[in-house]
Image (cartoon, rainbow, N blue to C red):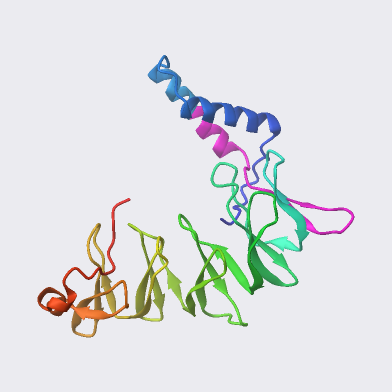
Amino acid sequence: MQKVEKNLPKATAEVVREYDELQQKLNGLDPSWSDEDVKAASERLYELENNYDWFNVEFTDPTTGKKGLKTVSGEVIAPALYDGFNEFHSYTFAPHSPVIAIKGGKCGIVKGDGSGLQLCDFKFDFIQSLPFCTLFVARWDGEKERFGIVAGNGEIICPNILTGVSEAVNGIMSIESGDKCGVIDIDTYQCVLPEYDDLEMDAEADIVFVKGDKRGYVTEDKGEFVTVEQYETDENFIDVPVFATRLP
């Protein structure tokens, strides 16, 4: 998550304490609370979230000059071992998400628990997290125009060929390379490379891939394109799973 500058005051220790107490009360809601009590607590939470800057804070080790990252509550989530960070997360939303750190001019990913545990090598030119999933946009090997998709451990899910990516819907993220499209299953990390002219995606349904005048499915096991007619009539494809959307 990129930090959005709103010129808001940084959340103080007192503000963080009030926020945490309200969250705890709402999460373990007392049956004696009235609707008015719940409404008041929820409105106060909303007020706190929108009137303060909750993003993680970069700090510098005065001895080494290296940078670390901590939450607004002061908890260290990345030790001061790095040259900088690519993005900052909010205390109100996933403050302990994996940290995209910079070292020696390259990006890598470290665990956001203060341990500094390295999840992937510092070999990427650029990394940015994707919302609501555990995948990342990345560039490597000097590529500047296009990008790929990687997992948190640095595994390449899709190579440096993409020009667009959409937010995941019902477990499926659509990807683009020029005028061609494909998909990634954000749970299994299976990728259908962008080789198709169009997609038809409905909630909790098989995804229809369009290639020229042909409409078909892509099998999960082999990534094989099968026309709709063949899938429905060929006994070799009975019960063969294909890429599909699903409800949350």
Q: Position of residue 125 (x, y in %)?
A: 64, 74
Nearer to the camera, 50 or 19? 19
Quadrant where the N terminus sits is bottom right
| Residue lying at the far bottom of the rendered structure | 212
| Image-quadrant location for residue 81 | bottom right
In the picture, measured across the screen, residue 25 lies left or right of residue 239, that is right
Q: Is residue 8 shown in magenta?
A: no
Q: Position of residue 239 (x, y in %)?
A: 19, 68
| Image-quadrant location for residue 154 | bottom right
Q: The magenta stretch spans which residues? A: 43-68
In the picture, measured across the screen, residue 17 lies left or right of residue 168, that is right
Q: Position of residue 172 (x, y in %)?
A: 35, 63
Name the residue: 12% across, 77% down.
Answer: 235
Q: Is residue 50 shown in magenta?
A: yes
Name the residue: 60% across, 43% down.
Answer: 91
Name the residue: 69% across, 49% down.
Answer: 114
Q: Position of residue 105 (x, y in %)?
A: 72, 72
Nearer to the camera, 122 or 95? 122
Nearer to the camera, 8 or 101? 101
